Amino acid sequence: MRFDDSLKTVLAADATTAFGAQATFRQLADLIARGRVAADEETLGRLRLLRDQVPVNVRAAVARSLALGQPPEALIALFAEDEPGVASAALRAARLSSAQWISLIPQLGPSGRAALRRREDLGTDVERALASFGSTDFTLAYTPAPSAIPVVDEARDAADPAPAAPGLEDAADPVELSAADRQLTGTGGFDIAELVDRIANFQQQRAVPAPVTAAPAPNHFRFQTDADGTIRWTDGAPRGALIGLRLVSNEAGEGAQVDGIVLGAFRGRTGFTDARLVLDGGERIAGEWRISGVPLFDPAGGQFIGYQGAAHRPRIDQTAAPVADRGNAEGLRRLVHELRTPTNAIAGFSELIETQLLGPVAPPYRERAAAIRVLAADLVAAIEDLDLAARIEGHALELRPDVVDLGRLLQRITADVQALAALRDCTVDLAPIDGTPALACDERATERLLGRLIATLVSAAQGGEVIAVSVSWNGLAEASVSMTYPQALASLPADRLLNLDVEGESQMPGAPLLGTGFALRLSFSLASQLGGRLTLAPDHVTVTLPAAIGAMGQAIAN
């Protein structure tokens, strides 16, 4: 029997800060989308409370991630209440049944229904439901402004005329208006001034139109040629770019670029499959295609009249181009989230056994539990490194500006790695720091960077070696922390250091689970995210980070 405490863990997190609110919003929406938490009033109400604390771009990213799960209708309805950009992202990514779409459509606004109209994977009954809102969605709202023109009351008593303006006593008699003129100017007709006011009011109140997106490039089309190989009919692609194009030609420089399969098939009046075609007709259809065709013959006389076929973009297995590396950072973060919970549970249970909190345990089992706890701690550290790498790759690493006392930070880090140094029988020597500089960085990320880097160097050291750590700062905008290499790494060039793997390293206790090369590459990326850099020298590694200059930096330095 398994008890899923994911919801309890997420709701127990601190959501009072901006970082905590965003993390809770992401995790709670992810649990609901994957069916691990019910979409009831409590969970949906929590999402609504957190929504105002989460930036729009983060909410839009969460809405796009719904495509990876099976979100319920209630969760999609909640995102559809949000701003148009967030609602549109959720409605384009969601996958619901036709009945669910039909029940959800009346709850959407015009922009939400417009997003659904751009989808091509909805059923006929859903499209019919959307069409029923056509006249409502395209009606312009109008609130008339108060008119500055006084309305003449036709029922006013003629015996109580309005006072005449001075100097107008001798004015000519008013011109009697015709029936048509009275219809244009009278209170019961259509007032031209009112029309002008309505147009001006609409111009002021209307929203800025969304930019018109270009039509997607086609990935397939059908065609038919005549006996000379000239395309006379096509669909699925711009007709102007294909009609009149010759697939085969006897003269160099004419026609499309096709391989010998097509030329041989035309000469022999035979079919061809997945032949190569290169087009230059604009950005939408330019590039490589794969075409297939069958010959056509006149049923009456049996005369060859052309080819009929289809074209499609080449698949990955049909091209020799290298496959682009499309890392799924979001998927990796989800995997890390799934691994972290059971690993923490294993570490917790092993600690309970080791400390005998549940009752007496035989010494051999306690030793096994201690070994499991150490291995689980290493696995947790590796999972945290993977999560950090995924956040950096997915541009989701959130850094909070802060002022960090570098001297105190290094003292805390060197104290934490003393146990590892004792295990490897080496020493970490922190040189005295004169004029302690302050860093303008996120404190947690800075501690993660320097701590991981020093621990990696210590894990590669041998008995009796010393890892020297020193700080240099000339009072300008940057401060540097240098760490000497252990003997095992000092003789290796920079490219070899960055590509060290676990198999090529020592399996001594304390060695990084993902390898020294991964730890160094992660340190490179994290230093860059903090606005600094990491430099590999022949005998030491240097981390340069921005220094805090000003009142706050001087306060910490003093």
Image (tube, helix red, strand yellow):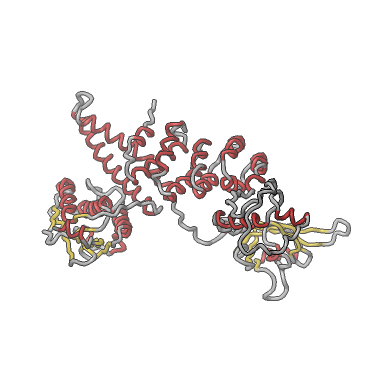
Q: Nearer the viewer, residue 274 or 175?
A: 175
In the picture, measured across the screen, residue 321 lies left or right of residue 420, that is right
Vertical placement of residue 156 versus 235, above or below: above
Vertical placement of residue 10 versus 215, above or below: above
Name the spot of residue 424 as percent of width and height, x first.
17, 49
**Image-quadrant location for residue 470:** bottom left
Name the spot of residue 26 as percent of width and height, x first.
41, 43
Name the spot of residue 189 as percent of width and height, x first.
71, 51
Name the spot of residue 132 as percent of width and height, x first.
67, 41
Residue sticking out furthest to the bottom: 252
Q: Nearer the viewer, residue 327 or 314?
A: 327
Q: Image quadrant for the C terminus?
A: bottom left
In the picture, measured across the screen, residue 265 lies left or right of residue 330, that is right
Whether residue 541 is visible here, answered yes or no, is no
Residue at left 21%, top 57%? 552
Residue at left 42%, top 31%? 42
